[in-house]
């Protein structure tokens, strides 16, 4: 409530050309909602000056994991605020995070970690994903990609003889790593690496987070020949 008061006062000052607002202190918030993203147990050192809110250092709980780093917000345009994030994520539930921030709901599961340096605009949940710019280094462990079985697709392209097609409509991902360069919600990568149950896959290209359109070139190598043998 205090932050809302400061934002309202700052907007009034900007309109009337009156005295600017400056404040600092310790921020502690039980639940903070940014568009559809929900952070809990938020705390940090807070400085508010001339409509700009800086929280650094900042820690928060995020979908079963944690986030730490710095957040900057330009509050004069609230509720649609430009945000800058420089944060590290640890053991975050990938499905819950992606379902909240993007249209990719119930598609990617696992434990997500990594570093993010992002610029975005909070306020309109539908526009948030298209406002994403910056870089994201990701590490997904013990994951799953729903809707496609990459081992089946690899076998189909390579025409492996004796391969027993798997009936599961998902791909188990032991480990996924890579760097995403984001521009207006489109992520480009040249080093995406996936370790699957029986193969290693590398990918380069783009991923449109808003439309979920993939334009990727993939290469694969067999890491466990046993999984390619048909059951007797």
Image (cartoon, rainbow, N blue to C red):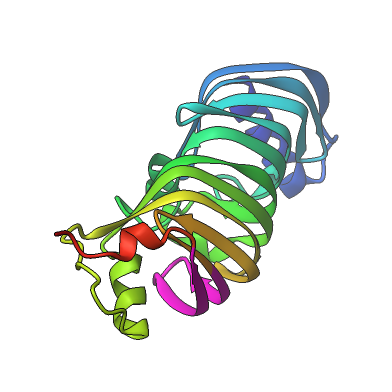
Q: Is residue 128 among the parts visible in the rendering?
A: no
- Counting from the top left corner in percent of width and height, residue 143 is at 41, 46
Secondary structure, magenta segment, majority class: strand
Q: Nearer the viewer, residue 163 or 103?
A: 163
Viewer-side residue, 4 vs 179: 179
The part of the image, by quadrant, that contains residue 180 is bottom right
Q: Does the magenta stretch include residue 90?
A: no
**Residues in magenta, as a range:** 202-222
Q: How far across and how far down the image is residue 31, in percent?
A: 49, 23
Q: Which of 82 and 79 is in front in this view?
A: 82
Q: Where is residue 213 in the image (x, y as percent from the top left)?
A: 41, 76
Left or right: residue 18 compared with residue 195:
right
- Identified at 55% across, 67% down, the residue is 185
Decide: is 208 above or below 111.
below
Residue drawn where x is 76% and y is 46% of the image:
14
Q: Is residue 190 above or below residue 106?
A: below
């Amino acid at each position: 409530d205090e932050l809302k008061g400061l934002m309202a006062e700052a907007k009034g000052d900007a309109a009337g050309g009156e005295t600017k607002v400056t404040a600092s202190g310790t921020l502690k918030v039980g639940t903070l909602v940014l568009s559809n993203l929900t952070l809990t147990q938020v705390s940090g050192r807070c400085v508010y000056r001339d409509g700009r809110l800086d929280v650094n250092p900042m820690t928060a709980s995020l979908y079963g994991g944690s986030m730490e780093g710095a957040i900057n917000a330009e509050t004069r345009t609230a509720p649609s605020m430009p945000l800058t994030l420089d944060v590290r994520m640890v053991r975050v539930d990938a499905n819950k995070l992606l379902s909240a921030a993007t249209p990719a709901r119930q598609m990617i599961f696992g434990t997500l970690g990594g570093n993010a340096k992002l610029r975005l605009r909070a306020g309109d949940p539908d526009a948030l994903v298209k406002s994403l710019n910056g870089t994201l280094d990701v590490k997904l462990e013990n994951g799953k990609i729903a809707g496609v079985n990459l081992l089946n697709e690899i076998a189909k392209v390579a025409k492996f003889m004796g391969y027993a097609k798997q009936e599961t409509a998902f791909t188990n991902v032991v480990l996924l790593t890579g760097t995403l360069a984001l521009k207006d919600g489109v992520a480009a990568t040249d080093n995406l690496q996936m370790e699957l149950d029986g193969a290693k896959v590398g990918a380069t290209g783009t991923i449109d987070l808003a439309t979920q359109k993939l334009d990727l070139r993939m290469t694969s190598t067999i890491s466990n020949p046993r999984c390619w043998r048909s059951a007797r």
